[in-house]
Image (cartoon, rainbow, N blue to C red):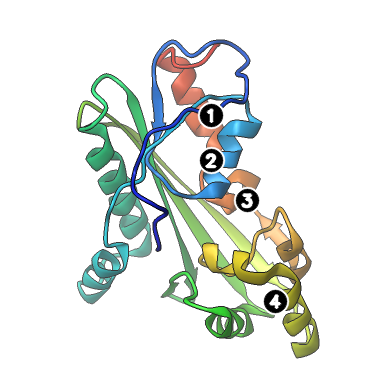
Amino acid sequence: MSNPAPPSPETQSHPSVLPAARAVILASGSSARRRMFEAAGVPVGIDVPNLDEAELKASMLADKVPPREIAEFLAEMKATKISHRHRGALVIGADQVLVLNGILFDKPADLAHARAHLRALRGRRHELISAVVVCENGAPVWRHTDRATLEMRPFSDDFLDAYLAAAGDVVLSSVGAYQVEGLGLQLFNRIEGDHFTVQGMPLLAVLDYLRIRGAIGS
């Protein structure tokens, strides 16, 4: 997974429902996860961890670590690393993996790779596993993992090429080469599971925890 420019905390300007009682930091460069909080009116700082996720995944796959544990481990690594830089804050780390018949998919490197991804997924069911871990003062204090099952319709090669041309490089930002909140929705005929989990983080469970900790209004 590619990381944006060097980590630098910043606060969202979107107004919250009630003022935050404590700092909440999102340890992620994902624009989708950032938009979730912004749309929900929850102000978060952004601090992106510098991790070689590809190498970590490769090592765990070689050791036959189950996909769920890979997602949970990476989410914890992100949150823990950033939490050491923000004492007293609740730091949220998240990770998502896509599994097709036991095979783990990574983000496509280019549009040709994205096309190969989608040809492998079309007409079949795959699973998205989204894990989230909250750390405080360098230690995990809460974790949650959710799954969603998606079935792609058997679209034509012509449709696939038109989709990639219309969507552009945005398809490279997700493991499945699609965003269900956009054009990618047209690839599917069935989605089972939480909408936010599909987008990369089980947001409702996270918001519940933030309320319990007094980080947002209850």
Q: Which residue is mark 3?
A: 193
Residue 74 picture location, percent across and down: 31, 53
Name the residue type under label 1.
Answer: Gln
Mark earlier in primary sequence (4, 2)? 2
Q: Which residue lies under the disc numbered 1?
A: 12
Q: Residues within 10 Å of mark 2 (few under 14, many from 20)?
A: some
Q: SS class of the residue under badge 2?
A: helix
Q: Is residue 174 visible?
A: no
Of circles 3 and 4, which is in front? Answer: 4
Q: Is residue 142 above or below residue 20?
A: below
- Per the model, the C-alpha gap separating discs 1 and 2 is 9 Å
Q: Quadrant of the N terminus?
A: bottom left
Residue 40, quarter of the rendered image? top right
Asked if disc 4 and disc 2 are in contact, CB closer than 8 Å, the reply is no
Q: Quick one: SS at disc 3?
A: loop
C-alpha gap between disc 1 and disc 3: 28 Å
Question: Does residue 212 sit above or below 102 in this rendering?
Answer: above
Q: What residue does disc 2 label?
A: 34
Q: Amino acid at mark 2?
A: Arg
For the residues labelled 3 and 4, the Cα–Cα distance comes to 25 Å
- The residue located at (34%, 44%) in the rendering is 7
Judged by depth in the image, the label closer to the viewer, 1 or 3, is 1
* Quarter occupied by residue 106: bottom left
Residue 164: which disc? Answer: 4
Position of 78 relative to 39 (above/below): below
Q: Secondary structure at mark 4?
A: helix
Quadrant in which the C terminus appears: top right
Who comes first in sequence, dot 4 or dot 1?
Answer: 1
User: Does the CB distance between marks 1 and 3 fall below 8 Å?
Assistant: no
Q: Amino acid at mark 4?
A: Leu
Residue 5: % across, % down: 39, 52
